[in-house]
Image: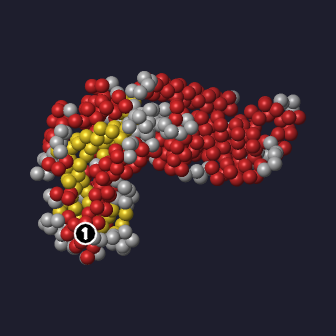
Amino acid sequence: MRVFRSSKVILTLMIVALIAAFGTSSAFAAKAAPKQKNIILATTTSTQDSGLLDKLIPIFEKQTGYFVKTIAVGSGQAMKMGEKGEADVMLVHSPDAEKKFVEEGYGVNRQLVMHNDFIIVGPGADQAKIKGVKSSAEAFKMIAKTESLFLSRGDNSGTHAKEKKLWQKADITPAGQKWYQETGLGMGQTLNVASEKKGYTLADRGTYLALKKNLGLDILVGGDAALLNIYHVIEVNSAKWPKANADGAKAFAAFMVSKKTQAIIKTFGVDKYGSPLFFPDAGKKVEDLGK
Amino acid sequence: MDLIVQGTIKAFELIVTFDPEVLGITWLSLKISGTATLISLFIGVSIGTIVALTNFFGKRFVISLINTGMGLPPVVVGLFVTMLIWRSGPFGFLEILYTPYAMIIAQAVIATPIVMGISLASIQNLPPNLRLQILSLGASRLQMVWILVKEAKLPLLAAVMAGFGGVISEVGASIMVGGNIKGYSRVLTTATVMETGKGNFDIAIALGIILLILAFIINALLTQIQQRQHLR
């Protein structure tokens, strides 16, 4: 009898699981059914970690009926996805790589969306004494000279690209140095590592402000024109990748530069952090930013 | 220390108030990993049993392969599944990358060798004379297999637990093929990674605790069935 009963229990469990699985598939289907309703947005960790996309995407979905699949990776990887036609639209912040991306015919309609700035953060003790230094390249030189620990993203993200550019400007090759460590992680995690190890790092202001409460890091250098962090939206070239959702990409890009969205970006974060995390720039020229 | 206490408090807050987002994430984790385990159960137990009961050239090699598969790194599975199903991949026409389906496939791939390996070992572990005895009592071959599988129920349930435990706690493949999309493919593990990245440690801890509770309930349930069987 006992054997019988427990096999019945197992059978019941299996049926329950099957029903759950079935319910699952129909629930999934409901969301994913109409073709080309999905947009794959490849973007950077900073737009997700700051919470901006959580605010904007639902508005866009409601307005247009599209379903946005946000894949938050570094800008480098986001553009690699675009190169392969695995994404429809990109929201990224790695201007040099973006220009190359468009020139090579992978992307079209690159539009300026917003900016904020990068900052050099570090422990309050500031052993390299960079606090208040005006030039970011100068600050990097001082970090190298004092061999203070510096945490690099090391992931080809927009922040990493900017950091490499600054080292170049400072005429220093940090790779391989003992004081230079690459985390290979996103911005949030790299900030945590820097905080734990009492090291310096380059961060975008948005992510820093969002995480500030848990970090033992201060803003040491900021405001340098070389530290501008500029976000563009790029549509994947559908001539190259016919499978890409060109209409969806266009709609998303239009949404990002629309007046209403720009107004939301302008005030996003003010209530929580006292200052906005991003500055809307649609229609402006890159050369005029930060003036 | 503060953070751990805060996280624990937050966890109970989220559970007690039935936070809809957390509830959704938990339910999705359960559905995806449950379905994946079920699939792996069908494939794993049947192939495991067949390999255990038949003799063929290269059997040891196949068993070595299965045993290696038990330690298949989830990120490697994630990488291969991604490459197979992305738009330019051989199964790109299915358009399932960054969907829960892709997560089920990846998790089933991870769980199947685990279930297969344990089923194989447990069937092989049955006394060899049992087969002859069952056959001599007039059972057909199919009936014999069924009886053997039932005899090995105890370790087979362990296989279910190992398989389910392996996939519900897995993050590497899930984040790669699922994309951690809010309200769609975000599960407990990927949400924990993201909240950690955002610095919301309290929510991350809370999600971790919910994951543990979930794993405990499922395993307690299965153990209950398994041990009752044992006392017979």
Q: Residue at x 82, y 45 (%)?
A: B55
Q: Residue at x 76, y 44 (%)?
A: B52
Lateral position of residue A34 relative to residue B77, left or right: left
Lateral position of residue B175 relative to residue B73, left or right: left
Question: Percent x, y for residue B170?
Answer: 49, 46
Q: Residue at x 37, y 60 (%)?
A: A154
Q: Is A150 drawn above or below residue B186 in the view shown?
A: below
Q: Is residue A271 visible from the viewing direction of this image?
A: yes
Q: Quadrant of residue B36?
A: top right
Question: Percent x, y for residue A197?
Answer: 31, 66
Q: Residue furthest left?
A: A291
Q: Quadrant of the N terminus of chain A?
A: top right
Dot 1: what SS?
Answer: loop
Q: Is A212 drawn above or below residue B179 in the view shown?
A: below
Question: Percent x, y for residue A175?
Answer: 37, 69
Q: Quadrant of residue A254?
A: top left
Residue marked by disc 1: A170
Crowd around label 1: few <14 · some 14–19 · many ≥20 (10 Å): some
Q: Residue at x 15, y 67 (%)?
A: A133
Which is more toward the observer, A11 or B102?
B102
Question: Percent x, y for residue A86?
Answer: 44, 40
Q: Is residue B228 visible from the viewing direction of this image?
A: no
Which amino acid lies under the numbered mark 1 shown in the image of this protein?
Ala
Q: Residue furthest bottom?
A: A146
Q: How many marks?
A: 1
The image's colouring method is secondary structure
Q: Chain of mark 1?
A: A
Which is more toward the observer, A112 or B189?
A112
